[in-house]
Image (spheres, rainbow, N blue to C red):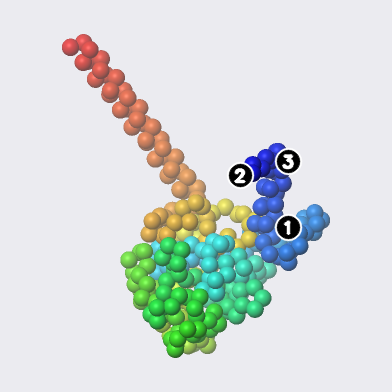
Amino acid sequence: METICLDKSAFKAVDEYWEYRRIVGDDDGGKLFTAEQYEEYKRKVLPQRVKNRLYVSFGVPGGIDCKLIGPETQCFCTHRYKQHKTDFEVVPSERPLALPCRVRGCYCPAYQYVPQIGSTPVRCRCKHLSYDHSEATGHLCKKCTCTGFQSSYICGCGQPSSAHLTLASRVNMSQQTLPLNHYNVVFLYSWQVETKLEREARGQPVGRDVPYAAMGGLTGFSSLLDGYLTLEACGSDQDREDGCQKRCSASKTNQASTKAFSSIHCKMTNKQ
């Protein structure tokens, strides 16, 4: 096996490239910006990105966020969240907020999270996978006469798919033009797109302001876990850091007390 050695300048160049890629994404059209273009892009885009960041999550209304969407999270159309429209100069007021796919030739009208079992998307009742169905509205199956993607999936929070459809109660159905079959209700309306203020109003963490594209609902490492594994009740990252410091302090105190007790016990034993 060939060993590749890199000096500090090479490591720095790699770090700078990944920083560039996380900020620009596919906005450069596959051709790297020049230094001047890169600085102009950051000057124009980053302020509005921080101001208008969208937090995307999948869950039950009034409950936990079962899944927080990040840049690499796949959509029903198999493309990543970062490949959908996520930057807005002005965030539209209508809800739900559609985030269409930007990949050429894809007919996905809005980002839609599909739960996975391991690395495999859940199956439809027709036994075919989500990518065996059309990404266009209605999601007809390409392999059978299935009338639309429907899943019997039960979320890790313990709630069946039918429980997730209650999110539709927060949507003005009279304004929707899509047919409300089982798939549309359970999946299309069970993910939430919200602004920073809307998320704070729900008492959910919003994290720090970052310049990176399509961060979605990710606010920390715990955001990578399913909601039922984290059960975050704090309203900010600072609250969680303070709680962690308190737990660490309490742990150190307990360790010190245990060592002191052991020392006293040993001395008493030696005297006897």
Q: What residue does disc 1 label?
A: 42
Mark 3 or 2, closer to the camera: 2
Classify mark 3: residues with Cα within 10 Å, few (<14), some (14-19) or many (20+): few
Label 2 sits on a secondary structure element that is: loop
State the residue at coordinates (45%, 86%).
Answer: 144
Give the camera-side residue of 190 and 237. Answer: 190
Q: Is residue 76 visible?
A: yes
Q: Amino acid at mark 2?
A: Met
Q: Residue furthest left?
A: 272
Q: Is residue 157 left or right of residue 129?
A: left
Does residue 53 appear left or right of residue 265 in this picture? right
Cα separation, mark 3 vs mark 2, equals: 24 Å
Query: In this view of the protein, can residue 61 be seen by the observer?
Result: no
- Quote the CA–CA distance across marks 3 and 1: 23 Å
Q: Which residue is mark 3?
A: 9
Tell me the element at label 1. Answer: helix
Cα distance in 3D space between marks 1 and 2: 40 Å
What number is the disc on residue 1?
2
Type of amino acid under label 1? Lys
- Sequence order check: which comes first, mark 1 or mark 2? 2
Q: Amino acid at mark 3?
A: Ser
Nearest the camera: 169 or 73? 73
Between disc 3 and disc 2, whose residue precedes? Answer: 2
Q: Nearer the viewer, mark 1 or mark 2?
A: 2
**Tag 3 near tag 2, CB within 8 Å:** no
Q: Nearer the viewer, residue 172 or 78?
A: 78
